[in-house]
Amino acid sequence: MSVVPNSEVQLLGQSNAVQTILSDVDCAARSGAKVLITGETGVGKEVVARLIHLRSARAAGRLVTVNCAGLPDSLLESELFGHVRGSFTGAYRDKPGLLEMAPNGTVFLDEVGEMSTRMQVVLLRFLETGEIQRVGADRSHIRVNVRLITATNRDLPKEIAAGNFREDLFFRLNVIRMHIPPLRERIEDVPLLFDHYLDYYCQQHRVARPQVSPGALDALMAYRWPGNIRELRNVAERLALKSSGQVLRPGDLPTEVVKPADRFEAAAAEGAAAAPSTSSPVEDLTGRMLRHGESFWSVVHPLFMARDLTRDDLRRIIEIGLENTNGNYRLLVALYNMPNEDYKRFLGFLRKHNCHLPFQRFRTIASRAQQTRPVAAAG
Amino acid sequence: MSSEPSAPAQHGTIVVVDDDVSCLVAVEQILRHWGLETRTFRAFEDARAYLAHARPAVVIVDVRLGNYNGLQLIHFSRQHSPETQWLVVSGFDDPVLRNEATKLGAAFLTKPLDLQRLREYLPGGHT
């Protein structure tokens, strides 16, 4: 199950797990009740939310997605509920909240487990009354008709036990629960998913579509995919970018996929030389973004701002990204799991801290490194 | 107490789903005392598997079933067994969940159960 990156939404896979999810999606779509989607990062929770919306009676309405992680409390409240002019510095005019912007539609709250206790109370009140009060407004309540779908990768019952999440909110959100299993529990879907994304990215980057050798396929199926489908998609895109149309062998796969410890037989069979991984903080952080699907904003940004990472570390992280994308900053934004809209903000951040590296040299490095296998996309 | 999913139940069966075993046994004993055929389930998944095919007369389900909400079971059953009467019970009178239950055509009762009210929803309850 995954999203085709641009528009079309579909669940991909033939495993029993996917068939069960599809039938649960139909059930949830018919019902109109609140849905809580759980599962590890990168399993496709947002895709499932989209499918429920698209198959429901609200499909003609909008689906608005809000990521509750990474937004400070006050900003999240104003995003969801809107604010009135003058309610805080910078609130120059009245602004409607996202809950108002999806009349007869669906609001998808991702990472709902990250909400502060105060925001949980605000949400609890909204669920009870169906009314929204803009930040800074005395009253002027507006009633909205939206369906709420929420998702989290946290174990909420555990968070409830630890006092971090309200039990009453959990039961209100959790009317229909859908658990999306990690990719390693439906490994039989990997060939289909990999084929799909390789096709997609080869088309998108206009490179020849390589065949996948049986050894490479074995390696892909033996890997645990800690970052799930998002990681598989990233691997497919990186391979597409480097593709010269020749057969993909285990040695062409990223080292983390064909680690000697995990896949020594495949590596030995096709003569792949997987480099032992070093574990400097930079490698560790890029690994978390490339393999586990974590975002630059949550992995690197806070450490850099707290001065736990030096400017050189940040430059090295950007360098690794540019090496993977042939010097393309737009692809780097996606590679480090940031939404496309963050492109300007990301470049602004790099410029401000003097870490915006010129991309040209990565293009030449890429083509020099692959002189034996000329790459159409290198120029 | 049987909990394995099996063949469809006959009409007239009362299904009780509660992960609190003391509540479950208490309700089961009362229902049996009233001469009603009863099946009980402690786990959401077992109840779900059973209700996917069965067409019981009444299902009494607790809202809080471990990680799940008992209301979810209604969705699995409603299409093929629309005549099943659902009684949703909860230790807390949450207006939001009460509203959800009502929208699904279920009755919402709070614990401790008022046996007279319970009886009204069961087969032969008005006689």
Image (cartoon, grey):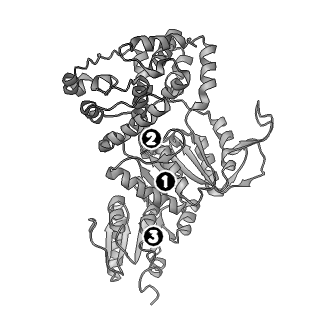
Q: Which quadrant of the structure image shows residue A135?
A: top right
Q: Are marks 1 and 2 on the same chain?
A: yes
Indicate the amino acid at tag 3: Arg
Query: Looking at the image, can residue B1 be seen?
Result: no
Quarter of the image that includes the N terminus of chain A? top left
Q: Are marks 3 and 1 in contact (CB under 8 Å)?
A: no
Q: Residue at x 37, y 55 (%)?
A: A20
Q: Which residue is mark 2?
A: A154
Tell whether A191 sits left or right of A144.
left
Q: Which residue is mark 1?
A: A174
What whole-number distance in Å separates the C-alpha atoms at marks 1 and 2? 14 Å
Q: Are marks 3 and 2 on the same chain?
A: no
Q: Is residue A320 above or below residue A27?
A: above
Q: Which residue is mark 3?
A: B78
Q: Residue at x 44, y 80 (%)?
A: B119
What whole-number distance in Å separates the C-alpha atoms at marks 3 and 1? 19 Å
Percent position of residue A170, x then y: 50, 50
In the current view of this chain or complex, which residue is farthest to the bottom?
Answer: B127
Indicate the amino acid at tag 1: Asn
